[in-house]
Amino acid sequence: MDRLIIGNWKMNGLSNSLEEIASLNHMIGEMGEIECYVVICPPATLIRPSCRLGGAHVHIGGQNCHSEQSGAHTGDISAEMLKDAGAGYVIVGHSERRADCGENDAIVNAKAKAALDAGIIPVICVGESEAERKSGKAIDIVLSQVRASIPDISPDAKIVVAYEPVWAIGTGLVPSLQDIGEMHSAIRQELVKKFGEMGDTIPLLYGGSMKPSNAEEILAVANVNGGLVGGASLKADDFITIIKAAA
Ligand code: PGA
């Protein structure tokens, strides 16, 4: 499968950041045919203009959606609204939302289902905390998140799963390549158990302090099909290096 590199801008970016998306589109265009699909998830306020400036090479996603498509939920955004604004993907269950907004696996599952119902691809995030890693139970914990956060899907539905150890996000810390490999292989087996052959076709991304200097070695690990990149996706010059490592 083609590599998938997704940039998560989090709560960063004003109108003047849109030039990063335009230059990214230009830089990827100059690379010619590549086996890498690139998505940026800007803040919701920038989705519509990003879709225009992303051109042919940068696809756009949201960072969160509600589990319902409309209703009395002040301040929330639905998957249908994201789709209407031009987004093709939405991140659900990011650990920052699990921590800041109390989102549990059941809520994440419902959000993923809402994304599929609206016709956009959910990027379902899982990952252990530092204490959970230290307890030696990281794999068990992540697999239970995988089981509970991923909805039952029809054979033609598309989803993405992102493994992001919470302690690696924004810290500069990264698990060893062996730990990444063990976790990704365990998640892959769980996906195959749940979905049969289709489980082999679900892109499985690594996220957490992926940057130009480590992207190539992480992307070479078995069952790592791409990356979910925070800080290093904000500047086109950094992000393009990761895309080149993937492509
Ligand atoms: P980071 O964030 O690359 O800045 O560690 C990754 C993420 O939270 O998706």
Image (cartoon, rainbow, N blue to C red):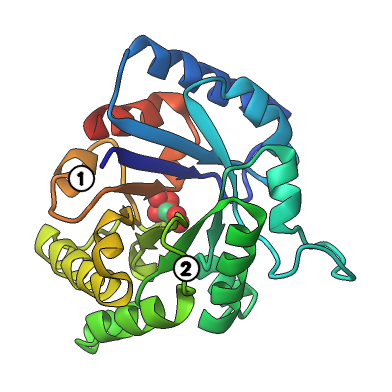
* Earlier-in-chain disc, 1 versus 2: 2
Q: Secondary structure at mark 2?
A: loop
Q: Residue furthest left?
A: 178
Left or right of residue 75, residue 228 in this image: left
Which picture quadrant has residue 114?
bottom right
Image quadrant in which the C terminus is located: top left
What is the three-letter code of the residue carrying label 2?
Answer: Ile
Q: Secondary structure at mark 1?
A: helix
Image quadrant in which the N terminus is located: top left
Pointer 1: what residue?
219
- Residue displayed at 66% across by 45% down: 43
Pointer 2: what residue?
153
Front disc: 1 or 2:
2
- Residue displayed at 40% across by 46% down: 229
Comparing 102 with 167, the one in front is 102
**Image coords of residue 87 (percent x, y):** 63, 42
Residue 205 versus residue 152 in the image, above or below: above
Q: Is residue 44 visible?
A: no
